[in-house]
Image (tube, grey):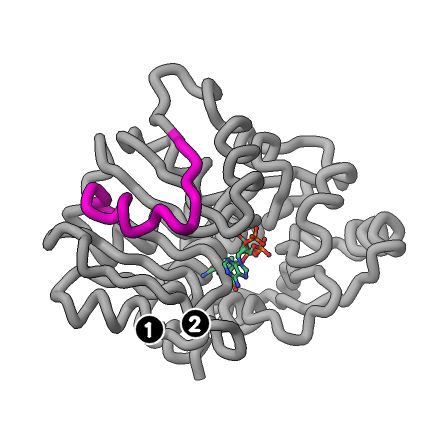
Amino acid sequence: MRKILKAGVIGHPIAHSKSPIIHGYWLQKYGIAGEYLRYDIAPQDLKSEVARLVDSGLRGFNVTIPHKESILELCANRSELAQKIGAANTITIDDTGRLHADSTDGFGFLQNMAAHVPDLNWRNKTIMILGAGGAARAIVWALMTVDVGQIILVNRTYDKAVALCAELTNQYEGMSEIIPGHWAEIPDFLPRCDVVVNTTSLGMTGQAALEINLAPLPANAVVSDIVYAPLETELLKQARGRGLSAVTGIGMLLHQARPGFERWFGVKPDVTAELESLVLS
Ligand code: NAP
């Protein structure tokens, strides 16, 4: 009898997680004898419950709120990115039961951008990131690896943008410049931006609108929104209305899942339109 390969996702709450749909789709598509389950783990139970998952033979798991930072304490190894970001979303368990942490949100962002704007060359580009939360952190660290020219990090709470910029400065040799910006300065920054990325929760169903006039953006600019509910945010509609390239957020969610699936189940999975529709339905 073939051994069932097991993986899952931990969080608290966890019922909303789309990860089982994504991994379930791939398990079926590639004919793998495996399972991917949700595990609701309260913060105070993290250590004991993770030990139980290791004992049960899990090959690894995804991590969502509120464990993305605290899981690192339980990991024997951390990728350079997970270490720098201070958070992980993908854990692999080796044959001796040791945990290896990685952060794949930034990878998911870059892969999604490449899939939608294949001719986008990051080199020397000016990128404005709206937001300085967990998602922004993963994205700016990833952008540091693709040689962009300048990152302008704009956040409602300016001090958080300043702190994140300070943390990133001088981390890589010859690295990109990253500067903080005030929310009120957005219209002044737009004329020199090649790419604008919304990483705030503004524009999400049930949240306030993201009110930005994209008119000053150059005609060849790309606008990306990592919010995916709704899929077509007002920001993206406005960008398309101006004839700009607009990239939705669902692909980031799908692509960030790929490294984990490959490590746990041994197949490099594809992101397809069918999977996207399934996750959005
Ligand atoms: P987070 O750590 O809580 O950060 C939230 C960010 O939104 C902060 O920068 C916050 O600014 C800003 N914000 C919230 N309300 C605002 C308002 N009224 N005006 C201006 N800025 C406001 O959250 P996160 O984990 O980074 O997630 C952010 C969004 O990205 C969520 O909608 C999430 O669903 C989405 N996301 C998508 C993916 C994907 O795969 N597509 C992955 C991760 C996250 P302050 O610092 O001033 O509070």
Mark before the other along the chain sequence, 1 or 2: 2
Whether 121 is drawn above or below 15: the answer is above
Q: Which residue is mark 1?
A: 234
Whether 234 is drawn above or below 184: the answer is below
Magenta range: 178-195
Kindly identify the amino acid type of the residue bearing the numbered disc 2. Ala
Judge by depth and name the residue closer to the eye, 44 or 95. 44
- 195 relative position to 211: left or right: left
Question: In the rendered image, which quarter is residue 115 located in?
Answer: bottom left
The percent coordinates of residue 75 (x first, y second) are: 73, 37
Nearer mark to the viewer, of 1 and 2? 2
Judge by depth and name the residue closer to the eye, 13 or 133. 133
Whether 104 is drawn above or below 172: the answer is below
Instruction: Identify the residue at horizontal 66%, vertical 51% (top origin).
Output: 59
Pointer 1 with pointer 2, Cβ within 8 A: yes
| Ligand 1 within 8 angstroms of badge 1 C-beta | no
For the residue labelled by badge 2, is the local secondary structure a helix, a strand or a loop?
A: loop
Instruction: Identify the residue at horizontal 36%, vertical 39% (top origin).
Output: 152
- The label on residue 209 is 2
Judge by depth and name the residue closer to the eye, 195 or 80. 195
Kindly identify the amino acid type of the residue bearing the numbered disc 1. Glu
Q: How many marks?
A: 2
| Ligand 1 within 8 angstroms of badge 2 C-beta | no
